[in-house]
Image (spheres, coloured by chain):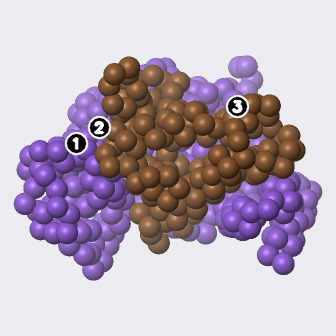
Chain colours: A purple, B brown
Amino acid sequence: MTSQYSIRRVDAVLKVIGQLKSVDFPYEHSKHALEKVESHFQKLKLDIERSLKSDSPDLSRNTCAEALEQTFVFLPILGFILRSTDIGNAFELHGPLLRLARTLLGDNIKLIISSEWEYSPYTYLPIPQLDQFVLIGLPSPESANPLVFPLAGHELGHTLWRYSGHATHIKPAIAEGIINDIKSNRWDEYVKTFPSQERDRSTYGDHPTDMEMIAPASAWAERQAEEVFCDLIGLRLFGKAYIHALTYFLAPGFRTRLPHYPRLSVRFRCLSDACHEYGINKPEQFADIAAVAEVQSDPTNVEKFMVSLADTALDRSTTTLMQLARHAAEDAGIKLPDDEEIDHVVETQFKKGVPARGQSGLANILNAGWRAFQDKDMSTANPNITNYEDFLKELVLKSIEVFEIENRTAN
Amino acid sequence: MVGVNQNGNPNRRILGALDADLPLLATRAAIELDRLLAGEDIGLESVTTLADLLAGSAEAQPGQPARSVMDPATITVMNRVISDYYEKPQSLAELAQRSLDIAKSFPTTHSSSPEKSKLENLRQFCIALSMYAASYRQSLFGSGVKHPFRI
């Protein structure tokens, strides 16, 4: 019965994919992704059929459970692919962002951008069945707002983190650092938190149970490190525009703390340090951003201790993360936004109400957008423009379109 | 699941219990072993990948105890699986050695398969790895992670 239900569920997903394939997609990557997912579900069906032949009930149960899990995994992705057709998307962004993604991640990268119904930009981590696909979701109220596009840089960072092997590289240092921190600085706290663990301080770290105890702290620190790295990639790709966009989205911060997310104050401190490191002029309003205290909801003593270990481990990693992000961009040949070009766009083009032309990168256009947005004189300069903000957003979108046309015709 | 180990080998692949694709890989390895037990050749692609990941998760020098390069979460999952199906490791070195032994015991071709009881044990190992990896991930990130590939 279970297996038959499993097969029916997979068949139902395959039927939906068949229907989605007839949708008119704005670019081919969405359709290619559907074909990959279809092939994955055909294989899952074969898995179940093969497991039915087994004399091991555990095998068929586990295979059906895995197929169910995969349905939970891929149904939202199918919805994401469908919503890449939504007219709320800024289709102008696809070409320039794809070019940037390929420069950073490789020539075979495929990109799908979708207008989503969650108020946070997000990405899916590299999925083996969708290898080389980058999926970036922008919240529907802002999905056509070019001023938030720099946040896509953060999402590209997640794919880079996985593809580059940085994740695996930094893991041992984090775990080793946590073990040393406990042994050297926090042994009494450890013993108090885990009173039933009778461990010798001198040999601590040699037993699998020691690793089991610190596994949450280590995993959370790794995830925190990834978030900070992605912020730094966003900063390195889009300069100050990334900080403005992040501030727009997150200020004054969340009131709850998730253990695997770094504190917002830490994220902005790292961005501030990185501005100095990368030679980017820091925006002035840094102080107001992370103003709300983030509280862990009813944490146990164990969780408090683990989060504290994770936070300290992240602190030890930030310099390395800054270097990794800088080298990643430099190795890909990606330049910092050019202040002179940005000034030129604002003064000679945006102030006249015409789109930017002859730009060397998406980042310059988006930074020019933010500069014009924050220039109060520009909003009142032309009395014929009734809604300056909408006008400016259209101007930036049109500039991105011009940039794409210039690139295509040049190639 | 591709990364670098502590010695900086960029091509070395290491088992990662928190990698969202591990449960499916282990399930497929179990299916391949199961079909091998039944005398049906459907290939050993997933078995080979899993064996490579296990082999990459520990280092062994002649005359020295094996050394684990797995992260704490992976050590936790492997410790549980190995304790269930083999003997409970008493040290990280023992866990690392056991991981290498299991990696070596996987069949590499259809004709080189080990005896039936060993294959059955390996099949159970893969099923357990799939189950433990899927559940442990959820226990670490809890309700904060709605989707295993979402971030």
Q: Is residue A256 left or right of residue A245?
A: left
**The residue under label 1 is which amino acid type?**
Gly
- Residue A316 in view of the camera: yes
Task: Return the residue at label 1.
Answer: A177
Q: CA distance from mark 3 to mark 2?
A: 33 Å
Residues at discs 2 and 1 both on one chain: yes
- Element under label 3? loop
Give yes or no for contact between labels 2 and 1 (Cβ–Cβ under 8 Å): yes
Q: Considering the numbered disc 2 on the image, is that residue within a helix, a strand or a loop?
A: helix
* Horizontal arrangement in the rendering, residue A163 relative to residue A14 (left or right): left
Q: Is residue A303 left or right of residue B134?
A: left
Mark 1 chain: A
- Circles 3 and 1 in contact, beta carbons < 8 Å: no
Q: CA distance from mark 3 to mark 1?
A: 38 Å
Q: Are marks 3 and 1 on the same chain?
A: no
Please state which of the two labelled residues, at mark 3 or mark 1, is closer to the viewer. 3
* Residue A207 in the image, given as x and y percentages of width and height: 28, 49
Gap between marks 2 and 1 measured at Cα: 6 Å
Q: Pick whichever, A232 or A367, lies toward us.
A: A232
Residue at label 2? A173
Q: Residue at x 25, y 44 (%)?
A: A206
Closest to the camera, between mark 3 and mark 2, is 3
The x and y percentages for residue A351 are 48, 42
Q: Provide the secondary structure element on which disc 1 rests.
A: helix
Question: In the rendered structure, which amino acid carries the disc numbered 3?
Answer: Thr
Residue A103, quarter of the rendered image: top right
Q: Mark 3 highlights which residue? A: B108
Q: Is residue B76 above or below residue A164?
A: below
Going 60% across and 45% down the picture, which residue do you hit?
A: A126
Q: Residues within 10 Å of mark 1 (few under 14, many from 20)?
A: many
